[in-house]
Structures are given as C-alpha cells and as structure tokens.
Image: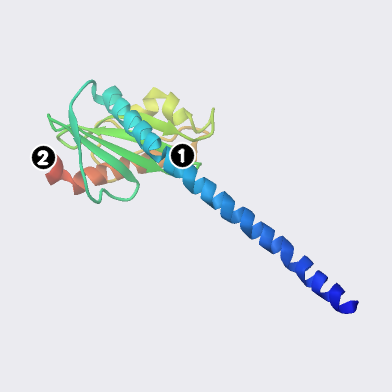
Amino acid sequence: MSEAKTKSTAWDNIKPAVVLTIICIAAALLLTFAYELTKDRIAEQKALKFSTSVKSLFGKVDCRLLDGELGEGVENIAVTSDGRTAVQVVADGYSKGGINVLVGIEADGTVSGIEFVSLGETPGLGSKVRDIETFREQFYGQSGPEVTLDAVSGATFSSKGMKKAVETALEAYNNNKEAILNG
C-alpha cells in the first residue's frame, strides 16, 4: 500500500509541470499563428503611416526609400526627386522608443520640418514637444552635428529625446549623403 502511495505522489508532483508545459506550447503556437496572420497588415499600416507623414512634411511628392544600414534608431530614409530627405527616427524620451518622428532635411543639409509618426510620451507633459510649435521650430535651419536646444519646462526627457532624434536624423543624412544626392 505504501508503494502505491509513493507512485501516486510522484505523479502528483510532476503533473502540474506537464500541464503547464502543454499550456505554454499551445500559447506559443497560437501567438505564432496570430503573428503570421497579422504581420503583412501591420507592415502595410506602417508604410501607409510613413507615406502620410512624408506627405504632411513635403506635400504630395514622389520619393524613393534608401536601402541598407541606415544607422541606429533610423527606421527609413525617403528622398524626393528634388533632393529633400525625410528621415524617420525612433528615439527614447521619457518612454523607451516613445518618440517616432520624421525629420525633413533640405538638399543643403538643414532641418526644414518635423512631423510626428507617433508619440508615446506622457500626455500633457512629454506631448508638449509635439504640441508646442515653437519648440519644433527651434530645430529648423540647424545642420548639426550638435543641435542646440531650449527644453520644454516639465518635459526635459522628451525634449532631450527630440534633440537626440534630430541629431540622429542629421547624422544619418550626412552618412548617406552620397546615396541621397546622387540617387
């Protein structure tokens, strides 16, 4: 009788681990299936948001995307036929990866505009970097590598994140200048 109790106890100890393993495998398979189902749609939405942001930045223009290693934090680089460049950068503000902007750069290498693709910063504080027009305008005309900054009060991390995003865009522009200008 004590042998039966021992066998039953051993199975009782292993049973939760087996059930948990089966649940984890099923969840992983379902997540993989859901990812495969939605990845193309998500990529289409990102491309649409990018092209909408380029249109907001430069108006209706034809542009081409640069391929290759663009730099850390750089998502895309689009170049118009007249040499204007839109560099999409994701930077950390208060939130990790919370600032996703398109920085417009003229053919002479100066910043001409900033358009937000998305902003994951704190509403009412970090979102001031998007909402206060004069904050964004201080970057216009700058060509880097060190960008001057007059931070938004109460949004220091977000302000520094915007500065980093603009500097990253200018660095990506300068590193890819030949491909940008010579098409």
Mark 2 burial class by Cα count in 10 Å: few <14, some 14-19, many 20+: few
39 versus 131 height, above or below = below
Residue 117: percent from the left, percent from the top? 38, 31
Q: Which mark is residue 183?
A: 2
- Point 85% across, 78% down: residue: 3
Indicate the quadrant containing the N terminus: top left, top right, bottom left or bottom right.
bottom right
- The residue indicated by pointer 1 is 98
Which of the two residues, 116 or 43, is positioned nearer the viewer here? Answer: 43
Please identify, in this view, whether the residue under mark 1 or under mark 2 is nearer the observer.
2
- Which quarter of the rendering shows the C terminus? top left
Q: Is residue 84 left or right of residue 94?
A: left
Vertical comparison of 77 with 133: above or below: below
Label 1 element class? loop
**Residue at 38% over, 23% down:** 133
Q: In this image, 7 relative to 72: left or right?
A: right
Label 2 is placed on what type of residue?
Gly
Q: Which residue extends farthest left?
A: 182
Q: Residue at x 36, y 34 (%)?
A: 46
**How many numbered marks appear?**
2
The answer for how far apart the CA atoms under marks 1 and 2 are is: 31 Å
* Extreme residue toward the bottom, this view: 3
Q: Is residue 178 rendered to the left or right of residue 55?
A: left
> Foreground residue, 2 or 138?
2
The image quadrant of residue 113 is top left
Q: How is the image coloured?
A: rainbow
1 or 2: tag closer to the N-terminus: 1
- CA neighbours of label 1 inside 10 A, class few (<14), some (14 to 19), many (20+): some
